Image: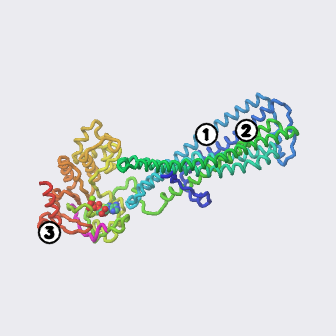
Amino acid sequence: MGSENNEQKAALTLSNLRQARYLLHYLKPHAWKFLLALGCIMLSAFSTSLFPFLLGKMIDAAMPGAATPAQLSPWNIPLGQWIRTVSWSLNTILLLVFVQLSLQTLFSYGRIYLLTEVGEKVVARLRTDVYACILSKPMSFFAERRVGELTSRLAADLSLIQDTVSFTLAELLRGVFTLVIGLVFIFIISFKLALVMLSVVPLLAVLAVVFGLRIRRMARKVQDHLADSNTIVQETLSGIAVVKSFTGERAAIRRYRQSILRAAVTAINNARFRGAFVSFMIFSVFGTIAVVIWYGVNLIQQGELSIGLLIMFVIFSVFVGGTFAGFAEMFSQLQKTLGATQQVRHLLFSGGEIELSEPDESVQPSWKLKGAVRFDNVSFTYPSRPEVPVLRHISFELRPGERVALVGPSGAGKSTIAALLLRFYDPDSGTIIFDGRNARTFPLHQLRRQIALVPQDVILFGGTIYENIAMGNEQATAQQIEEAARFAHAHEFIERFPQGYQTVVGERGMKLSGGQRQRIAIARAILKDPVILILDEATSSLDSESEWLVQEALERLMQNRTSLVIAHRLSTVRHANRILVLDKGMLVEAGTHEELMSLPHGLYRRMVEIQAEEVG
Ligand SMILES: Nc1ncnc2c1ncn2[C@@H]1O[C@H](COP(=O)(O)OP(=O)(O)O)[C@@H](O)[C@H]1O
Ligand SMILES: [Mg+2]
């Protein structure tokens, strides 16, 4: 509720600007275009200012020889003299106006096109870098709930940066040029008149800014009150049964009316303020114009000014005043952008581990695994929930090629063991050892490339089936992909789709059944050809028909690999070499099916009995 958006401003200080310097790195490849655009801005501001000049001259052409004698002013430089006294024929001036307009058109086009191009390209790269940066953060980063919020926030920040590169900077620059050129012109036209004008206009501009801000803040308050009353409407309508059953209609209406009245009273108070301000501004702006023209006409009568020059002067004054007023908005926009650059910078350059693989980083011989895994007294707590120990003093061993099952009630910590194997997290104490080497010594990707995980809920990404399988090995040929699919019992159903392997799946594509997705995941894993395989309840959510197909595909997948099979349905783990029973983060039993069944009060035996009852 409330209309406060999440844009953060940062003061326009030198150190803040220095911190935003990293943007230059993104701007650099487009430096030439950017400079060209700046040139266009400068030239377009300049040619804009020729317009009032030519207009004034056109009017003076009606009265050839209108008095513009040398004026007593410190600005009596030759250029000033020329600007004041030059005269052309009416037709020449019209021609000049069109030359000026053509130039202006050209420069404006160049400015808009070039800056948009630069802005889009800069932000496209920035967005990609930010995405890559988020994606390569360690798992603990994603455990924080703020990730979604952070990313949407970053998207807004990046748009803000883009706006500034493509638009605000240009406007600011144009404003500065217009201001400088305008001021030079009005002083050249008439020093006295310029002083009169400048004694009022900047003051008015500052007032307009200050009161403008105040009025906006007040308008926001009205919005907040209105939002409150909308909440009342939503609450009462969605809980209409409660309202009616307690005959609370009257109370609700009363609450609503009070809330609406509050908004109305605030708005009315604002109107008083706004009305006063607007009338004051109208009075002063038009008053100033009247005084300036009155004084200007006086100067004309004294022969110090021509009508054309006076008109020139008035138009330039409007330019100057308008630019002044526009600066406030631009500064506020710049401050927001600076705040945005800090957020982005924080993400891009904050310390912390970055997990990003090289493009074709294959498994190096020195890191090649044989498939022996050992947990040695491993304890673990999730960083996001430090008060709950999830694994306690876990020790077990998988020999190369062995199939070991991990069972236990839900929440026991089975998936956490899988996560530790993949080094999504490192244990708090104890060590995980692959082939006699501490897991921490492995480069992350060398390790992860040799382990495959088939989870319970397979997520397919938007793209074709082909691409989804190829995720297992980006270098795979079409033939290898088809082989993997055959092996995973997936080829048959894929072939039945009209587009075959090119069928688009994922959120906006074809919906596949759980078993079909599972078999694609298996094909993915086969293609990856891992040394160690983790099945985390891979068949739990399947109906019995597809379970059979998936089970068989999994059997093939597990051949000659070290496999850790996490299972809920105990019938599927009976033939494992060993069964580990996990309960509340502790390893409570270990042995073959027969051994565990012979324990009279064992957890495993109890679980088997309960499941047998459920089935039978
Ligand atoms: N990312 C996480 N952050 C914090 N706690 C978690 C996270 N994942 C799991 N847990 C907690 O750790 C415990 C073990 O979870 P898990 O390993 O998923 O159990 P299992 O797979 O055996 O059902 C549970 O209490 C669960 O709530
Ligand atoms: Mg689990």
Q: Residue at x 52, y 46 (%)?
A: 121
Q: Are marks 1 and 2 in contact (CB under 8 Å)?
A: no
Query: Which circle's residue, 2 or 3, is located before the other in the chain?
Result: 2
Q: Where 199 falls versus 354 (above or below)? A: above
Q: Position of residue 257 (x, y in %)?
A: 49, 48
Q: Is residue 368 visible?
A: no
Mark toward the start of the polypeptide (1 vs 2): 2
Query: Where ligand 1 lies, by image quadrant?
Result: bottom left
Q: Quadrant of residue 372 in the image?
A: bottom left
Residue 188 seen from this side:
yes
Residue that badge 2 annotates: 50
Of the numbered discs in the image, which one, if any, rests on residue 110? 1
Answer yes or no: disc 3 within 8 Å of ligand 1.
no
Which quadrant of the view contains residue 311?
top right
Mark 1 vs mark 3, foreground winner is: 3
The range drawn in magenta is 389-401
Q: Which mark is residue 601?
A: 3
Mark 3 neighbour density, 10 Å: few (under 14) some (14–19) many (20 or more) = few
Give the tally of numbered discs.
Answer: 3
Q: Amino acid at mark 1?
A: Gly
> In the picture provided, is 259 more to the left or to the right than 298?
left
Amino acid found under the numbered disc labelled 3: His
Helix, strand or loop for the magenta stretch, by majority: strand
Return the residue nearer the eye: 468 or 171. Answer: 171
Q: Is mark 2 within 8 Å of ligand 1?
A: no
Residue 183 image position (x, y, % from top left): 75, 46
Q: Is residue 583 above or below residue 357?
A: below
Q: How dense is the environment of label 1, judged by Cα within 10 Å: few (below 14), some, or many (20 and up)?
A: many
How far separated are the C-alphas under marks 1 and 2? 19 Å
**Dot 3: what SS?**
loop
Residue 531 percent across, percent down from the top left: 26, 58
At 51% from the left and 54% from the top, the residue drawn is: 6
